[in-house]
Structures are given as structure tokens and as C-alpha cells.
Amino acid sequence: MSAPLLPVTLGDIEAAARRIEGQVLRTPFLEAPRLSEFTGARIFVKYENLQATSSFKDRGALNKLLGLSEAERSRGVIAMSAGNHAQAVAYHARRLGAPATIVMPETTPFVKVANTEGFGARVVLAGETIADARPTMETIAAREGLTLIHPYDDPLIIAGQGTIGLEIADDLERNDLSLDVMVVPVGGGGLIAGIAVALAARRAEVEVLGVEAALYPSMHCALHGLEAPIGGATLAEGIAVKVPGIHTLPIVKAHVADMLLADEHAIECAVAAFLSVQKTMAEGAGAAPLAAVLADPARFRGRSIALILSGGNIDPRMLASVTVRSLERDGKIVALRLTTEDRPGVLGHIATLLGRSGANILEVSHRRMLLDVPAKGASVDLLIEVKNAAHAAEVEAALAADGLKARRLKAGDGGDVLTG
């Protein structure tokens, strides 16, 4: 029996590469020694967060726009997107003189909405997810005669994303490198479908794995004939897709070895690791491949792994929260509550003790009107910076030796230093 005909071929991807050459960045594909030490695998990273709109979506959006007629571009285009596809369509549509309307879920991070509007697009907010935004998009498109630029389920989009696979295959050949596994974030499947087609033709020995957010296992369920709850608030909103693509699904079935799921904790840790270890910005979706490796290191240990860092458009407030939470998990930021006497000089004495112990005070909250504090006492909440968990224990011991017993605070304990 002959293999089924797939909607995208290597020839389509090679044509896309020629079409978009010089208009998108040929992104670096570099070894990451510190991540390798961190995970026990030999890690390479494809830095798609360095594109003009900070994600791989530039490739597919541009390839689709260039495939339209002049009349279609002049009438205008429309897209539905949680952010990265929106920005890519807006940016390249403006370059090509095509009016762009973007329908985005109401939950889209502010930074992505602002960036999309900054590229000259009209933004319409509707629904909680991409699927919820679709009826609004279809209504506007029909009323105004706009051409849809789909975020993933279009052969020209898939072919554009597949140029990443061609670049990696070329880099492996040029540098005489071998690769065991490619790990790709998956929403609707456009990115992994394009890469899988390219690698199947150029580097068939490479195992291609997809990673979905555990709250949105749509492709995983489709591949295995399963039903599972799909939805919820995820840090990886860029891959929060409820239904895989009609064009992408058969390609994934043909060329992808497995579909992994990354929970929110693993995604959060991966975002923090890219920032602290690799000194690069990754949004939740872009960090999903590293999250999969961190969640199951035994599967990848000793193997040569390529991670697609698909985007870096993370909300600054969310990044700050992830960073502080990471430091707290590592024991480098500690929140303490002390109950002390309410008398002059106590705060100065505590500050002196902490200084002598090598701790840095980040924030202080001093309160007297709590019922669990003696009438002549006060509660002092401290957020301190320390070297590591062992140093934190030394600081607590120094406070206890001076008669000041400290209680560790966690988020939800009601400490001002944690809740702001």
C-alpha cells in the first residue's frame, strides 16, 4: 500500500524558503552547555525568539501573505490568534501594504495586544480562547471580504514553519553534527507538521516529539483516540488550542513519534531556566520543549536533543512573577514572619542581625494591629535575599539565637511581602 498523500511536501517547504529568504531571520542553532549540564542531555536550541516579532510565526505568515494575489492583499487580511501569529501577520501585512484585522481572545496578555496594535493592525477582542474567537472572525471576514490567514491549518503556513527544519538540517550537515531527537511545541500543529516533513526528507534518523500543555492535550487525544478535558488557564497560552488542524493531523500521524504533555509547574520552571541558565527570554509555549525534558530527564539523558524555542513574547508582569517564584523555590528569596516587642530600636536591631548574617533585606512590613500578636508586640514580615537554602537556614538560626523565632511564609499566608 502506498503512503498517503500529505498536504505539504519537501518541495513546498523548499519553495517557501526561497520565497521568504532575506525577509525573516535565519535564526541561530546553538549548543547550550549549561542546559546540557542541567538536564544530562546534549542540548541544542533553535532561537526563534529572535525573529522580528519574537516568534517563529513570521515564517508562515509571510509565506501565506506572499502567496496571495495583489487584489487579495489590497482588500485586506484577517487572522485569529492568541498573540504571536497576530503580531507576525500585522508586521508583514504592513510591510506588504495589506490592511490587517486580528481577532484575539480576551485573555491574551496585554503585551501581545499592544505589540499587534503597534504593528498597525486593527485588534478585536472576543472569547476566552482561539476557538471562541472564531465566530467573530468569520463574521468580520464575510462582511468585509477579508482573506483569512489561519494560524496553523493552511499548507502555506505549514510550509513556512517547515523552513526551520531545513535550516536545522543544513546546520547539522555543515557542522558535521548528529541529532537524536527534535522536541517541538504543539498547539494546532503547524510548526511540528512543517518541521517533521522537512526532517523526514532530510534527516529521517531524527525522532520528532511534540509537546502540548497538559491542559490542552488536543493533538495527543486525536492521535490516540482519547477524550479528555481540554481548557483552563495556562502559562503556555500560545499553544492553548482545543482542536488540531485538518491539514496538520495527518502529517503528525505520519512523521511524529510521540506527543508529550507538560504541566504548568514544568512549564514555569522551564521559562525560569531559560532566563537564569541560558540568559534568553522564553514564553510558556516556547519553553514547553525544555519543560518536557525537565519533567522526564531519564528519557532524554545522554541523547542529543534539539529544542525549538518558538517564541519570547511573555508578559513582563508574568515573567517577574515566574522569576520571583523560581528564586523562592531555589531558596534564594525567603519570606519570614517575626513576632517582636513593640519598642524603639527593634527594627534596627533586626536589620543589623540580618546584615551581619549576609542577608539582603528586600522588603519589610511592620504591623501592630493583629489579634494573634500580643498587645505590646508587633509582627514583622521580611522578604530577604540569601545565597542558597543553607544560607537561609543560617540566617534563621542567627535570629533564633537572639531570641527572635522566625516562621517561613508561603504565598497565601497573608504576608504583605508576598502579596503586595
Image (spheres, rainbow, N blue to C red):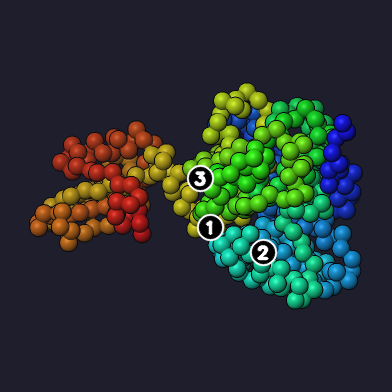
**Residue beneath disc 2:** 134
Query: Image quadrant of residue 52?
Result: bottom right
Residue 405 visible? The answer is yes
How busy is the neighbourhood of tag 1: few (under 14 within 10 Å), some, or many (20 plus)? few
Residue at 36 percent across and 59 percent down: it is 420
Residue at 88 percent across and 71 percent down: it is 71
**Please, what secondary structure does the residue beneath circle 1 have?**
helix
How busy is the neighbourhood of tag 3: few (under 14 within 10 Å), some, or many (20 plus)? some
Residue at 43 percent across and 43 percent down: it is 327
Nearer the observer, disc 3 or disc 1?
A: 3
**Residue beneath disc 1:** 316
Do the residues under discs 2 and 1 have CB atoms within 8 angstroms?
no
Q: Which callout, 3 or 2, points at the residue further toward the start of the chain? A: 2
The amino acid marked with disc number 3 is Glu
Pick out the residue farthest to the top: 302
* Depth check, front residue: 336 or 140: 140
**Residue beneath disc 3:** 264
